[in-house]
Amino acid sequence: MCYADDALPPFPPIRGGAPDGEQLVLASADSTRFGAYGAHPDRANGAGIVILPDVRGLHHFYEELALRFGETGLQAVAMDYFGRTAGLEPRDDSFEFRPHLEKLTPDQIAQDTAAAVAWLRSPAGGGCQDIFTVGFCFGGSNSWNQAAAGHGLAGSIGFYGQPQRTQPFLAKIQSPLLILIAGADFTPGEAYAEFATQLTKAGVDFESHTYPGAPHSFFDRTFAEHQEACDDAWGRMLDFIARHRSQVN
């Protein structure tokens, strides 16, 4: 598990007005209803972002993260993975995510992400023109994978993703990737180096950054010792988004 119930997303470096948040129920192309959380910025900038959680799906950390993105002017929606098997009920640290995770497929994740993207493009979701994804741990790889799923994304960001989960999709990636790496993560640096080589050979537009000594899940404001890394990660995400606006594939 990536983030526990007491984890809190870091504040972005530039904060606007307080956004409004709402619990949502979205529906994918196969009629699956799943939970999500939307954040409406006080001053929208026309861009939106889909947040793909860690292995236990939607929980408080990602709902608050949607609000933090809202403070930067981005319309945000954090989505759940387990509508097919776990329903719409809220969950805490006691949630047994593993049986649900084992039934989840990349195609289902892509279908649900498509529904979240469609919400961002709708009037209810702000009518966003440029849409990005961001994910953490299991969601980090899922975020990169969405660049190959035909959503017309402007870019995809992933923290602590596992490169082997994205390798099958390399030939279909259509938008830029931002790869943020914890230097003390359980995924070895050599795996990311090989991933970079594969992305280059596939002609993928990408950039990556490693935070030496930072552990898995360092992007958490309860970890005061990693505030500098958190601030830098926010800066890299917002810069990546700004540079890839209006470059939708």
Image (cartoon, grey):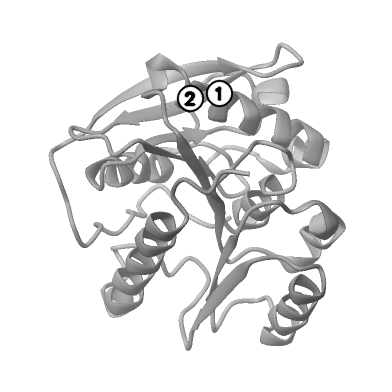
Compared to residue 108, the image places residue 106 above or below, namely: below
| Residue 145 x/y as whole percent | 71, 50
Tell me if residue 189 can be seen. yes
Compared to residue 75, the image places residue 139 above or below, namely: below
Mark 2 Cα shell of 10 Å, populated few (<14), some (14-19), many (≥20) = many
Instruction: Please give the residue where the numbered disc 1 appears in the rendered image.
Output: 118
Are the residues flagged by discs 2 and 1 in contact, CB closer than 8 Å? yes
- Residue located 74% across and 41% down the image: 149
| Residue 160 x/y as whole percent | 58, 66
Label 2 – label 1 distance at C-alpha: 5 Å
Compared to residue 4, the image places residue 75 above or below, namely: above
| Residue 66 x/y as whole percent | 36, 40
| Residue 128 x/y as whole percent | 42, 30
- Residue located 56% across and 73% down the image: 207
Compared to residue 175, the image places residue 82 above or below, namely: above
State the SS at label 2: helix
| Image quadrant in which you'd find residue 176 | bottom right
Residue in the foreground of this view, choosing between 19 and 225? 19
Please state which amino acid type lies under the numbered disc 1.
Answer: Ala
Residue in the foreground of this view, choosing between 228 and 209? 209
Q: Which disc, if any, is residue 121? A: 2
| Image quadrant in which you'd find residue 100 | top right
